[in-house]
Image (cartoon, rainbow, N blue to C red):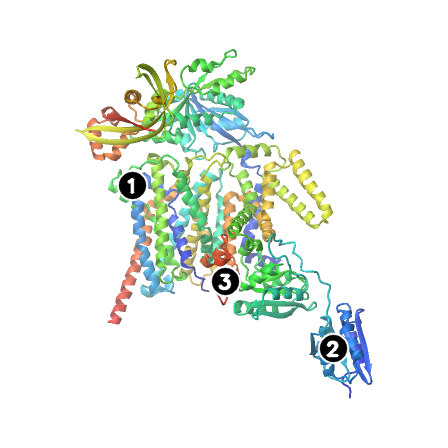
Amino acid sequence: MSFFNVSKKIKEIKTTLNESSDFAYRFYKKDKQIIGLVYLKSIIDQNLLSNAIYFPLQTFEEKLSIKTLKEKIIKCADLKSIKEEDIIKEILDGRVIVITNFSKELISIDLYKFPTRAPTEPPTSPVIQGPREGFVEDMQTNITLLRRRLKTENLVLTTLRVGSQTQTKVVLAYLKGIANKKIVDQVTKKIKEIKIDGIIDSYYVLSFLQNRPNSLFRQIGNTEKPDIATSKLLEGKVAIIVDNSPIVLTVPFILMEDLQNSNDYYTNHHYSSLVRVIRLFGLLIALVAPGAYLAMQIYHYNILPLNFLITIADTTQGLPFTPFLEILFIFLLFQILYEVSLRLPSYLGLATSVVGALILGDTGVKAGLISPPGVIIVALSKIALYTIPEQSSQVTVLQIIFIILGGSLGLVGMIAGFVYLLNYLNTIDSYGTPYLAPYGPRIPQDLKDGIFTKPITQMKERPKSFSPQKKEKT
Amino acid sequence: MKEQCINIRQACVLILMCIFTNKILLLPSLMFEEAKADAFFAVIVLFLLDIVVLPIFIKLKTMYPDKRLFEILSKKISPILTKFIYCVFAVYFMFKCLLVFSITYVYFKQQIYQDEIIWLILISGIPVINHAIMSGVRAFSRTIELLKWAVLIGFVSCLAFSLFTDLSMPFFFVSTSGEFFSSIFNHIFSFGDYIFLFVVIDRIEIKKGQEKQLYISSIIGMLLVGMLFFLFYAKYQVTAFMHNNALADILVFSVQFNAIGRLDIIAMLTIMFITLFQLEIYSYAFCDCVLNIFPKLNKIFSIVVFDIIFGILYYVFIGKYEILVGSSQFWSPWLGLFVNYLFPIVCLIIILLARRKKNEKTD
Amino acid sequence: MKKQIEKMVKQPMIIVFIIILIFFTPLAIYSPGENRNRGVVTAIGIDKQDQEYEISLLTFIPTANQSYKEQTSIISGKGGTLAEALYKAQINMGRKVGLAHAKTTVVSKDLLQEDVTNHIDYLSRVASLPENTVFVCSSSSAKKLLEASQGLEQKIGLKLEQLIGFNANIIYVTDTSLEAFYKGYYKRVKSSIIGYLKLKELNGDSQSGGSSKGGEKEQNTANNLIEGGSQSNDIALNDIINEGEAVLLKDGRMVDILSIDELNGINLLNKKALNQIITVNNVELDGEKFDLSYKIKDKKVLINTKFENDIPVFSAQLILGLELVEVKGNHETIVINTEFSKISKDVENALDNQIKKIFTDALKVMRENKTDVLGINEIFFNSNRNSYKKFIEKIEDVDNFIDFVNFKLSLIIQPD
């Protein structure tokens, strides 16, 4: 009595996989019993395959049955029975499928091996003191990193599959009893509703999760560091780990999170308050400095102090550009240099910085194309931008808008633009959390981790903004 | 769709902005022309008259926690009369907007921009206001809450910097009682800062025991304005009538910090923020009134109505704030009297009647 | 296309932004900016000749250089009214006039012969002119003063407003701005003080003219520096002589020029006026006679006003902290001695007399000119309003009030 025609079945599978070149199979015969092993050799650990399956199989001398196979022969931890229709999916996940002619049961063995990199310190968020591990592209490793930090039965990991072609695993991680159930449900629903052929990076998921996908402002948090992800989970947020991406998403998200940095929690809280104030000023300068400079030049010469006015007037005299074009020109120069320095290999980076600093800046001034105050103002705003690197893309867009507002409408236009911006940000909410919390609206309990921080001993409650189920931390 | 509510803290900052309305630029010098430095006392009297309205509001709110003012009035008085009251409200708020705008416009023209700028200011102000109305009272009151400290610090530092120069006691008790009362009567329209709260009575969440905060913020606002009046008169004494922008002008003579130059940029920024907020508040109130009068209208239409009427009125009074202020001498006090004081009295009567009914029932 | 328009209507702010882009950004791109359009005026001079005003503007006109030095030039225009003159000056300049940074306004002495408010009405109306512009009178024409100040600035970098600022802080100890002038003008007795600068015509061959004129009087060293520095200069510039004088105005008309001593007398009651030197002559100490100079270190003024038998009495108590700075006498007998720093009864009496004398002199000037720069009227009005009003009714003219006031000055010297 035979249940499967093994060779026929293997042939079937091969056809389904379009006779892919990395498809491999192996028969094992003993008397009339035939065992077939099917797998993709590119994504499994072949050493383990021979050690854990072949070798025990060959040395086994009793009669084979599915029970002995599972219990005595195959020396693998992750082993399960699967249905026939799941075969392809399992193979593609890096599993070895065991097909026998003596049982209806199909065994799937986890032998996957992808090339992974070690969890090194991510370049986007280096710390001076503190854990240096970072998430990697491999999801298993990422989950390991989280598990290692959260040794609690309350850490819930739910796996979902997204992408009709890529079938990417998306794991929802949250702490049961702490994270708000409503938010978890909402996120799960949104992820399930994603209709796309492939998820290449977590940013693809992020785009679908945002309440306002058109908005300039990111409404989902992201991190590359397991320690940050852990602390966010503890605050009652939901983390979304996407396979093949080292970026882990967290919801709900507030703007304040970008002002926070993991360094802040690993140093003295007085210092971190100071640094946050500086970051805020940096953000403000980055936003308005070029626009305000322009507004003062074009409309409000009377506000400028006389000495400064003289400097500006003297240096801008005889320039071929009007102030607006000058600032726009310098802005463009900086932006081009920035793009180039990002893309170029590092050994060419030095060359661009020399060209940028010397030729374009200094010679530009000497040649009378641009004025020194203009260069200083734009450079200042561009540097200030990177006090909050997470917001740099948004703020760059806003810089141009404020340059246009300042240049065409003056200070009043800029203030109006600023008020509009805040009004707009106040209409955004990220899964029930106001975007500008804890300042708009003011949530006194959450100010402990606001601009002026308190020591961790005083942060006894989880932030109210994220409406956690359990408030007290202890 | 019911709009989202604001909390007590946001209501407080709205009150603060309302209290600053029209009082920090032109009013001190206008009132000086009539009552001399005694205008300071006139302001105190007007503030006292104003603050009496607050308990009426709180009582009304506790009696009808979730009802709109329109519903309360139409139930208690009559729907048609209520519509009439709302029409008067709409006119009232529109002119408040216009007054705020034109006073600030003159200030901008004198101090910030040098040339004709009407379009610049309209194009920068109106869209922001419209967006604020569209996004609702919660969004913009959160913005005001966020920038509350910036505004307050700006205001207080204007007052503080003015202390660095010669100040002497203003000459009080020089005007006749006629002058004194006429200055009170003529500028009644610039007061009445709690009427906005009545309009959004259903959108404020007041928990028990929080009413105190409303009083505190009112008193802070009134103290600041009162101090501004006092310092302004103390600084300029006899020439106060020559200075149209009180908040900025008290800074002009302060110590010149060497390289910083003009300090009145603080006043400038403060005034810009305050003006935008006030315009947001009053235009929102106007649109709310329009929506109540014509319930079938869409919110967008009410905004369009606001823009058109505002544009036309502004065109009529374009830059001529003297005309606005001058012509308003005839009607604005009466409008102010009606809305600021008569309407709260009506509310008080409603409250008293309701209470009597309740008492009768319990008896 | 239709869909795109529909999408845009849903986001009206984008439309607004596009409108700004279309209508206003070209303006911004085209506009060279106010700072390049305007000549920034740092000082204004006003003269009047034969019913025609001449307005001179010390203007900063930007030039393309990297030295960031203020290059100023004087541009003037004439016209029947100030506005007209300014308009002409603007045409001469070829730029719009920017008054927002005008720190000094100079009027010629001739203008002060009649009510000056008639002449400077324009200045009080023009909004862009800051009200804290310092108001100064020049002994000859204002234009010449500006020219001289330009020379001063080019040679030693001393600006007119710095010079005046020094005076205002140290000598007048009051605001001498346009606003302060108006404040005085609108008081009960219309009187105010503004700064006064003398001009001395310099000939090509003159040498160290400043000091020859100045004599014992306090003089700003700046003038000497100029002459020492540049003899080679072909253009003989006028020289500003700062003697710390001030013009006393009544009804906006010049009535007197106050010397520095008279100013010091007026400022006796001013708490902020410190560092003045009081010298007492021929004081006997241990049988020898000395001249002693004291510097006022600290000052407190207590003022009390009342009506005694319907006569206004103004009593002021001066509490001074004094520091001995100079002893003049026979130096053979003077040893550096701590005794001097102690103020003996004799010295105290001498000081008392000296201070009373200074104050009486100042009061005399005020009474002669019927001016009240001390604000005596205001003080009485505030403290004894009813009696004051009755008294004014009795004497009919408010200007004469100061003549009737009985001044009582008492001196208390604070021990160190």
- Identified by mark 1, the residue type is Asp
- Pick the quarter of the image with the C terminus of chain B: bottom left
Residue drawn where x is 56% and y is 41% of the image = A294
Q: Give the Cα distance between marks 3 and 1.
A: 54 Å
From the viewer's perspective, is the residue at label 2 or at label 1 nearer?
2
x and y percentages locating residue A44 in the rendered image:
75, 69
Classify A249 as above or below C95: below
Helix, strand, or loop for circle 3? loop
The subunit letter for the residue under badge 1 reads B
Helix, strand, or loop for circle 1? helix
Classify A222 as above or below A378: below
For label 1, the crowd category at 10 Å Cα-Cα, with few meaning under 14, some 14 to 19 and many 20 or more, is many
Residue at which label 3 appears = A462
Residue at which label 1 appears = B38
The subunit letter for the residue under badge 2 reads A
x and y percentages locating residue A196 in the rendered image:
66, 66
Q: Give the Cα distance between marks 2 and 1.
A: 100 Å
Q: Give the Cα distance between marks 2 and 3.
A: 47 Å
Residue at which label 2 appears = A74
Along the polypeptide, which appears first: circle 2 or circle 3?
A: 2
